[in-house]
Amino acid sequence: MGASDGNIYEAYIETATEFYRKEDKYLKTLQKIPDGAVTGLWVDTVADARKPDVRRVLIATPSRLLHLVGKIGRVPHEGGASIYTRLFETEQPVVHEISRVSTTANSSLVVSPDAPDAASLESLSPDRIFAWLNSQGVFYGRLLTSPAAPELGSKVFADAKLLPKSQLPPAESAGGRKKAVQDSIYSIALTQWHVLHLVGGRVIAINRLDDRVVFDQVVLDPGQQALGLFADQQKNTFWLFTTQEIYEIVVTDEDRDVWKVMLKTEHFDAALRYARGPAQKDAVATASGDYLISKGSYIEAAGVYGKSSKPFEQVALTFVDNDQPDALRKYLLTKITTYKKSSIMQRIMIASWLVEIFMSKLNSLDDTIITKAELSETLNSAQ
């Protein structure tokens, strides 16, 4: 538990319900953060088969985000000794600090919910996402799980990025003009792919892959007092509470554009995983092939192009012009499997071309074998 005076406590919650069992509970002070209130805490297990007792602790304050990794003590029974004392006494935190902290700005720490199904972000990467709201904006990134060592914090912070509050769209005034003054961010929540912001009475959703605003709507009436945005970590539901009402923020088909973003950032395997339907998959295959050609990976490009709708002549000429007979052979072998049996002419032409290419390859291999045998004193052509 984190307190507004900077103290972090550990408490044991008794699970026994028998009335005769002794209530042996404790409250242990683990650490006092010198720079004010604790505005967020997160603990998770860092996956390491050799060290099952390793935990990560994230601590948020208005000006700093602290990352601790270390071994905990033995799990207590019946409200025994503290398990986190060891971690806090032996490990030094990695700190991400911001300057020019506003005393009026809100601060909080949120973590992405459990993956709703197998075809989600968690199947690509087991790492959850964290987001720290501070006076500059939202600092967010992946909660990497390896290495299970103190330097993990440095990797997590180096991989994260800041979405400044100035990047959020300003509210419109009564005359339809944009306000010059930017409201402060009151609360945030994380979905699988988006960061939800409560700014004034508006809910703004930003795609965290490309920082694009995908939703911006005024929800609260003037004078309504918001309590904040909240997520159900297991159910993947998202809520806005006020002092009078509860709003549900319904997420529908939120990964529909993920393949486009992955394609732009050249993450082709991920793009193909999220592509829906033949048209999207074909666009990924074509772009992936073009990228591989630009890198000189002709053999890999041949297999990808063979499953795309890129014009046959264009691909074949690319391999011929670059003197890549092996890549051309792989492309033709892949392409011939995509034609139906009724496409007799196309299949005959490709098969004829393949026979010619195989014969040429076998001849060149023969020449190479004979040449090597002639140049060697110990080898003959049979060997």
Image: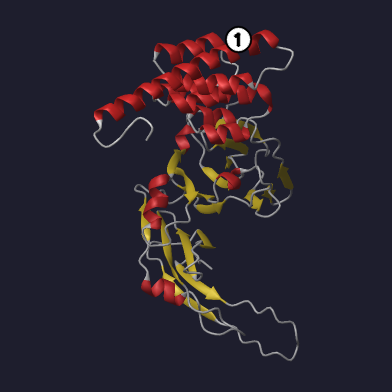
Q: Is residue 49 above or below residue 297?
A: below
Q: Say which quadrant the N terminus sits in.
A: bottom right
The x and y percentages for residue 324 are 42, 19
Left or right for 324, reference 251: left
Colouring mode (rainbow / by chain / secondary structure / one colour): secondary structure
Q: Say which quadrant the C terminus sits in.
A: top left
Q: How many marks?
A: 1
The x and y percentages for residue 309 are 60, 16
SS assignment at label 1: helix
Residue drawn at 44 percent across, 38 percent down: 164
Q: Is residue 107 above or below residue 257?
A: below
Amino acid type at mark 1: Met
In depth, the one of 86 and 300 nearer the eye is: 300
The x and y percentages for residue 208 are 53, 38
Residue drawn at 74 percent across, 13 percent down: 342
Residue 36's image quarter? bottom left
Q: Which residue is mark 1?
A: 349
Left or right for 9, reference 280: left
Residue drawn at 46 percent across, 67 percent down: 5
The x and y percentages for residue 226 are 64, 48
Left or right for 200, reference 180: right
Residue drawn at 49 percent across, 66 percent down: 55
In depth, the one of 7 and 329 nearer the eye is: 329
Asked if one can make out residue 6 in the rendered structure from this viewpoint, the answer is: yes
